[in-house]
Image: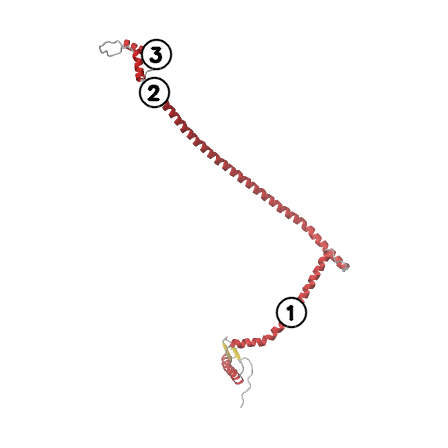
């Protein structure tokens, strides 16, 4: 009795689905092995379960070599035909860009007033309107540009004026500080010079005073000569041999007379009377 035909659809029962997956997987791996051994074929089998688990079989030594061989065989023809299509699309784009460039050059020459012969009336009117609109735009932009340039110049002038004022103020401050410093230095120099002059004057006055004192001493030094001269002028006082204590008017008058005579004769006061 033969096996009944199995309907190919998803098994709803989870346990039955898992059991069927395990049986069919093992049978598929067995058939791949038998095919590689019996027919000497290079077989590679990759299976992923619903949980993401990997099951693989490769008849060669490396699965990567088999996959590289597969990529070369499958995508080689596509890669060979792709450059032709890319070149064709690039050439079409080049033609479009070339035609656009030529039209732009023609328009530019027409705006400059060149090559106007091939143009018809409609194209000339369109060019005229384009020129008028461009001229209006330029005229409307010109005042704004002039105003902006004027404001920029005015701002620069104000900035330069402020900078000039700051520089002048700084120079004035520097000059005032310098003059004050110079005045202080000059004052200090004058004070030092005054001190030096005062010291010199003190030294000179001391020397003069010392010289005067020495001169006065020299005048009073010749005592023997004065004594010799005074002996001729002074007379022995007449007094009683007896000791008289008290004031004697006669003796004092004699002494004053003798001193006056000595002053009249010599013209100076003897040193012993100083």
Looking at marks 1 and 3 on the same chain, the residue that comes earlier in the sequence is marked by 1
**SS at badge 1:** helix
Give me the residue at 55% from left, 41% from top: 167
Report the disc number at residue 5: none
At which x and y percent is residue 37? 51, 84
| Label 2, residues with CA under 10 Å away: few <14, some 14-19, many ≥20 | few
Q: Nearer the viewer, residue 44 or 186?
A: 186
At which x and y percent is residue 193? 44, 31
Q: What is the image's colouring?
A: secondary structure
Q: CA distance from mark 1 to mark 2?
A: 138 Å
Q: Nearer the viewer, residue 234 or 245?
A: 234
The residue pinned by badge 3 equals 265
| Label 1, residues with CA under 10 Å away: few <14, some 14-19, many ≥20 | few
Give me the residue at 64% from left, 47% from top: 149
Looking at marks 1 and 2 on the same chain, the residue that comes earlier in the sequence is marked by 1
At which x and y percent is residue 147? 65, 47
Vertical arrangement, residue 68 with respect to residue 179, above or below: below
Q: CA distance from mark 1 to mark 3?
A: 154 Å
- Contact between labelled residues 2 and 3, with CB atoms less than 8 Å apart: no
Q: Name which quarter of the figure residue 272 lies in.
A: top left
Residue, far left: 242
Give me the residue at 70% from left, 59% from top: 105
| Label 3, residues with CA under 10 Å away: few <14, some 14-19, many ≥20 | few
Q: Name which quarter of the figure residue 92 lies in.
A: bottom right
Q: Nearer the viewer, residue 129 or 228?
A: 228
The residue pinned by badge 1 equals 87
Vertical arrangement, residue 228 with respect to residue 149, above or below: above
Report the disc number at residue 218: 2
At which x and y percent is residue 52? 50, 75
Q: Name which quarter of the figure residue 157 lies in.
A: top right
Which quadrant would the C terminus be assigned to in this image? top left
């Amino acid at each position: 009795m033969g096996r009944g035909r199995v309907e190919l659809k998803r098994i709803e029962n989870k346990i039955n689905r898992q059991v069927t997956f395990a049986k069919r997987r093992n049978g598929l791996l067995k058939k791949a092995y038998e095919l590689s051994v019996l027919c000497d074929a290079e077989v590679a089998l990759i299976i992923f379960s619903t949980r993401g688990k990997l099951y693989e079989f490769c008849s060669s030594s490396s699965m990567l070599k088999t996959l590289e061989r597969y990529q070369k065989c499958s995508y080689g023809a596509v890669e060979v035909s792709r450059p032709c299509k890319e070149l064709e699309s690039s050439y079409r784009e080049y033609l479009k860009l070339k035609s656009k460039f030529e039209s732009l050059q023609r328009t530019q020459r027409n705006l400059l007033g060149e090559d106007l012969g091939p143009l018809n009336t409609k194209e000339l009117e369109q060019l005229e309107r384009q020129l008028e609109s461009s001229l209006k735009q330029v005229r409307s932009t010109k005042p704004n540009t002039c105003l902006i340039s004027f404001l920029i110049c005015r701002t620069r002038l104000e900035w330069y004026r402020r900078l000039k004022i700051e520089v002048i103020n700084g120079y004035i401050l520097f000059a005032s500080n310098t003059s004050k410093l110079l005045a202080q230095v000059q004052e200090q120099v004058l004070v030092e010079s005054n001190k030096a002059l005062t010291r010199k004057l003190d030294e000179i006055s001391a020397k003069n005073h010392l010289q005067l004192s020495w001169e006065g001493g020299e005048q009073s030094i010749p005592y023997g000569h004065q004594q010799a001269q005074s002996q001729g002028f002074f007379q022995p006082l007449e007094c009683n041999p007896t000791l008289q204590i008290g004031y004697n008017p006669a003796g004092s008058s004699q002494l004053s007379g003798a001193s006056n005579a000595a002053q009249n004769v010599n013209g100076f006061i003897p040193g012993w009377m100083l």
